[in-house]
Amino acid sequence: MHIGLGLPIADPTALPEWARRAEATGFSTLGLLDRLVYDNPEPLVTLAMLAGATSRIRIQTEVLIAPLRDPALLAKQAATLDLMSGGRFVLGLGVGGREDDHEASGTDIHERGRRLDQQLGVMQRLWSGERFSDSCGPIGPAPRTSGGPELLFGGFRPAAIDRVGRWGGGLLAAAAPSWAGNLIDLARKSWCEHGRSGSPRIVAQLNTVVGPQPLIDRARGAILDYYEFSGRADYMAGGLLTTTDQIRSAIRQFEDLGADEVMLYCYGTDPDQVDRLAEIVL
């Protein structure tokens, strides 16, 4: 099973160092979250820079809030990043749930699921080289990966998880092992019901930090701030894994569930976190 690293957002200027260390120590993937009304770096711009700072490690959005964006432009950006990274780009997508993000982008939060499905239809046509419309030509460049970059879908409702089978790709299970199994089962069911061959890729996510207590306290504070809108901030902060035994146990549980990759989303701000986590899991 592969182990990837979810990047912190507090200091974007430090992320190239995180990326180089992650590649050198053997992590499989670099992941980056997406928000609009928040103090985080824009993920496509940031991952493009990190692709240039590395040569092997995959780069992945976890997840990009697609309904905030224009589908033709997003298709072009994703194809460009896939091409210029040598096919290392994974496009994780979701609908988002923060009203302020949709207000700032001028999109309707109540239409976000329908909008994502419409966007996926447009993007897959463009990635295949088709015209945008009868009066508007194709939009290049062609992605390095045939048919477009690999897709992952985040979400918790059956309709969201059904996109795994409908559109092809995999599941980003951002849940504890104790209840991620149901999400994984739904993704596999969707895959079969839509007649896909093989099986969907399952990518799990764990929140981690390793180090002295002040670092752990700051990480918990960051989680509380990020999830304040949800009413579940205390629950999310309580799930932060801070010891070797906790991290290894959770990875084993996901391995038992058949996950292909586990992303350790790191809330620590010190790049030494990369080496500490590598010592535990790699």
Image: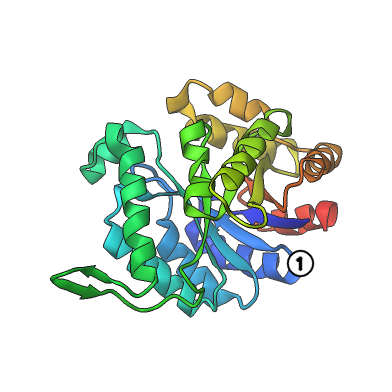
In the picture provided, is 39 more to the left or to the right than 107?
Answer: right
Q: Residue furthest right?
A: 245
User: Few, some or many C-alpha atoms within 10 Å of disc 1 (few <14, some 14-19, many ≥20)?
Assistant: some
Write down the residue under mark 1.
Answer: 25
Is the residue 79 above or below the residue 225 in the image? Answer: below
**Which residue sits furthest left?**
135
Q: Position of residue 150 (x, y in %)?
A: 53, 62
**Image coordinates for residue 156, horizontal then vertical, percent:** 53, 33
What x and y, as percent, mark residue 271? 66, 58
**Looking at the image, is 130 positioned above or below residue 69?**
below
Residue 63 appears anywhere in the view: no
Front-lying residue, 271 or 27: 27
Q: Is residue 30 left or right of residue 122?
A: right
Compared to 157, does 165 lie above or below? below
- The quadrant of the image that shows the C terminus is bottom right
Towards the viewer: 18 or 176: 176
Picture quarter with the N terminus: bottom right
Q: Is residue 86 visible?
A: yes
Q: Quadrant of residue 196?
A: bottom right
- Place residue 208 in its image quadrant: top right
The kind of residue on which mark 1 rests is: Thr
Residue 17 lies left or right of residue 129; in this view the side is right
Spot occupied by residue 232 in the image (x, y as percentages of width and height): 53, 22
**Residue drawn at point x = 40 percent, y = 74 percent:** 80
- Which one is nearer the viewer's eye here, 263 or 224? 263
Viewed as shown, does residue 218 lie left or right of 229? Answer: right
Image quadrant assignment for residue 74: bottom left
Residue at figure coordinates x 39%, y 63% from the top left: 124
Q: Secondary structure at mark 1?
A: helix
